[in-house]
């Protein structure tokens, strides 16, 4: 028994070592892409290693596709958003704070799946919901800032300028739903979700968590100087994961 445990430990260490080597090589090759800052790429390598080591290629591809989709949405109408002062800083490149603000919850849930007694299906559902919510937020924010015709504060429904914390628009909300459903579909195709029920749940939770994030932005974030956008993003993904796992448990989806 002891020899078997040692062998399993050696295999696991080798698996993680390969995950590190593969991600280091991929990050070195990808750094020329205008998606992340240099420090952001380093942290993306750490994240990629955690995901490949815990969830395998399905988890790794899920986050790569999230990053690609989010960056694509950010670039839509970018010149116009720059002229209005609403564009993302650094030409839309994400830094370490953006990487972990988006992925800390998902990375933690992915790591929990390696535990012997872990409820893997439930943790994968939470993982999927966290990234669905984040893509929903990105789509809603970027589309709303560029094409939202009437932007209102979610708490009062009073008109506010585009880009205001807690602001929503009909166009942005519709984009959030599409973004959440799209990310849930990616998770379904990668095998991280199983069946129509989990897909619908994750898509719905992604939108709900995005609206709750707007409430936090309009309320708490205005009063708490330490509550940065990155912390709010992390809180949104945590809310999405908890809501999805709780709902799945209640209705028997996982």
Image: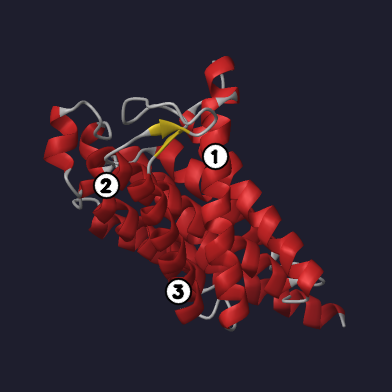
CA–CA distance between discs 2 and 3? Answer: 20 Å
Q: In which quarter of the image is residue 68?
A: bottom left
- Residue shown at the point (34%, 30%) measured from the top left: 163
Foreground mark, 2 or 1? 1
Instruction: Provide the secondary structure element on which disc 1 rests.
Output: helix
Q: In which quarter of the image is the C terminus?
A: bottom right
In this picture the colour scheme is secondary structure
Upstream in the sequence, badge 3 or badge 1? 3
Badge 2 marks a residue whose secondary structure is helix
Q: What residue sits right under mark 2 in the picture? A: 74
Q: Which of marks 2 and 1 is nearer the N terminus?
A: 2
Q: Distance between the residues labelled 2 and 1?
A: 19 Å
Mark 2 touches mark 1? (CB < 8 Å): no
Which residue is label 3 attached to? 185
Residue 171 can be seen, yes or no: yes
From the top left corner, tell me how far across and down residue 59 is, in percent: 51, 69
Quarter of the image for residue 95 reads top left
Q: Are marks 2 and 3 in contact (CB under 8 Å)?
A: no
Residue 13 vertical placement versus 222 (above, below):
below
Mark 2, Cα crowd under 10 Å, few <14 / some 14-19 / many 20+, is: many
| Side of 185 where 120 appears, left or right | right
Residue 24 image position (x, y, % from top left): 37, 58
Instruction: Where is residue 225? Give x, y as percent.
Output: 54, 15
The earlier-in-sequence mark between 2 and 3 is 2
Q: Element at badge 3?
A: helix
The mark found on residue 213 in the picture is 1
Residue at 64% x, 56% y: name it: 241
Farthest-out residue, right: 1
Q: Is residue 149 left or right of residue 165?
A: left
Against 116, is 240 above or below?
A: above
> Residue at 65% of width from left, 58% of height from top?
109
Q: Position of residue 128 (x, y in %)?
A: 55, 64
């Amino acid at each position: 028994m002891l020899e078997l445990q040692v062998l399993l430990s050696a295999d696991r260490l080798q698996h993680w070592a390969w995950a590190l080597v593969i991600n280091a090589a991929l990050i070195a090759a990808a750094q020329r892409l205008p998606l992340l800052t240099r420090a952001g790429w380093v942290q993306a390598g750490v994240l990629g290693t955690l995901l490949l080591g815990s969830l395998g290629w399905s988890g790794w591809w899920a986050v790569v596709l999230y990053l690609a989709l989010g960056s694509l949405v950010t670039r839509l109408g970018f010149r116009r958003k720059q002229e209005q002062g609403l564009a993302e800083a650094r030409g839309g490149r994400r830094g370490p704070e953006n990487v972990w603000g988006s992925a800390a919850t998902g990375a933690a849930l992915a790591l929990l799946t390696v535990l012997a007694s872990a409820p893997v299906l439930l943790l994968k559902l939470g993982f999927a919901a966290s990234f669905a919510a984040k893509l929903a937020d990105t789509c809603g924010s970027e589309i709303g800032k560029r094409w939202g015709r009437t932007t209102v504060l979610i708490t009062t429904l009073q008109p506010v300028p585009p880009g205001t914390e807690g602001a929503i628009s009909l166009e942005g909300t519709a984009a959030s739903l599409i973004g959440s459903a799209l990310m849930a579909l990616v998770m379904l195709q990668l095998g991280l979700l199983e069946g129509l029920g989990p897909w619908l749940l994750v898509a719905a939770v992604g939108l709900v968590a995005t609206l709750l994030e707007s409430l936090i932005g309009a309320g708490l974030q205005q009063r708490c100087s330490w509550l940065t956008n990155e912390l709010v993003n992390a809180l949104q993904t945590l809310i999405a994961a908890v809501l999805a796992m709780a709902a799945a448990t209640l209705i028997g989806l996982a």
